[in-house]
């Protein structure tokens, strides 16, 4: 849990840095978010399209989760175990900004952002983390590395897709990151607006 909080903090800080850099260094390539580039005397109103400019990047990673697990590997169609392999891996979750539903009520001064469900964006097994226990020395061959790596990748993908706790934490992280991205912009344009992220 401490690792997840640390990772979330890093993600939020990184996003705040990007937004801050876009404000103070608008000509840096890759930071043309354009949300703070109002000219003096120019009036900016809060609309769905103006909020969409905050989300010009299409995907956002909301968390990186470390996994430790063990896989049992058998011969195809057999019940006898060849070996067990322990591994460490990383699961990356995120959302697609294009799928955020934006609703602005200017009369009530309310902005509602409905974010999509997080998805597993990537899974990666650290190949140098594989640790084997062989049931028979005949299976201890250099060729086993490739097979084991594939089995570990499959295991990590399957486990992460069914890990409700991981997905729930990632969803909360996504809400907090989106809030951290939009709040400074809303505060600058009109601090009377209330932001709600679901």
Image (cartoon, rainbow, N blue to C red):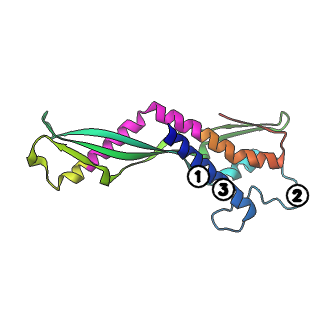
Residue located beneath label 3 in the image: 17
Q: Residue at x 63, y 51 (%)?
A: 13
The image position of residue 101, as x and y in percent, is: 66, 39
Would you identify the image quadrant in which residue 113 lies?
Answer: top right
Q: Residues within 10 Å of mark 2 (few under 14, many from 20)?
A: few
Give the percent coordinates (x, y) of residue 107: 86, 35
- Ranked by sequence position, the earlier of labels 1 and 2 is 2
Q: Name the residue at 64% across, 54% down.
A: 56
Dominant secondary structure (helix, strand or loop) of the stretch shown in magenta: helix
For marks 3 and 2, give the CA distance: 25 Å
Name the front one of labels 3 and 1.
3
Within 10 Å of the Cα at label 1, are there few (<14), some (14-19), or many (20+) other Cα atoms?
few
Q: Quadrant of residue 47?
A: top right
Residue for point 21% across, 46% down: 132
Residue placed most toward the observer, 131 or 35: 131
Q: Is residue 117 visible?
A: no
Mark 3: secondary structure: helix
**Sooner in the amino-acid sequence: mark 3 or mark 1:** 3
Image mark for residue 31: none
The answer to whether residue 142 shows anywhere in this view is yes
Q: Is residue 189 left or right of residue 99?
A: right
Q: Quadrant of the C terminus?
A: top right
Q: Write down the residue under mark 1.
A: 58
Residue on which disc 2 sits: 42
The foreground one among 10 and 115 is 10
Q: Is residue 23 magenta?
A: no
Q: CA distance from mark 1 to mark 2?
A: 28 Å
Q: Which residues are magenta?
A: 149-173
Q: Is residue 168 magenta?
A: yes
């Amino acid at each position: 849990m401490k690792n997840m909080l640390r990772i979330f903090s890093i993600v939020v800080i990184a996003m705040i840095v990007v937004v801050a850099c876009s404000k103070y260094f608008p000509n840096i390539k890759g930071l043309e978010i354009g949300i703070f580039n109002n000219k003096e005397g120019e009036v900016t109103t809060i609309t769905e399209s103006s909020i969409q400019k905050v989300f010009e990047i299409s995907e956002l990673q909301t968390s990186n989760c470390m996994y430790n697990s063990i896989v049992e590997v058998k011969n195809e169609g057999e019940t006898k175990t060849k070996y067990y392999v322990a591994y460490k891996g990383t699961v990356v979750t995120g959302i697609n900004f294009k799928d955020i539903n934006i609703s602005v009520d200017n009369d009530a001064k309310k902005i509602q952002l409905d974010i999509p469900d997080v998805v597993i964006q990537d899974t990666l097994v650290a190949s140098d983390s594989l640790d084997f226990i062989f049931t028979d020395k005949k299976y201890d061959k250099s060729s086993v590395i490739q097979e084991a790596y594939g089995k570990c990748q499959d295991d990590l993908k399957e486990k992460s897709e069914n890990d409700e706790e991981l997905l729930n934490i990632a969803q909360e992280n996504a809400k907090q990151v989106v809030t951290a991205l939009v709040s400074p912009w809303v505060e600058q344009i009109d601090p009377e607006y209330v932001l709600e992220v679901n």
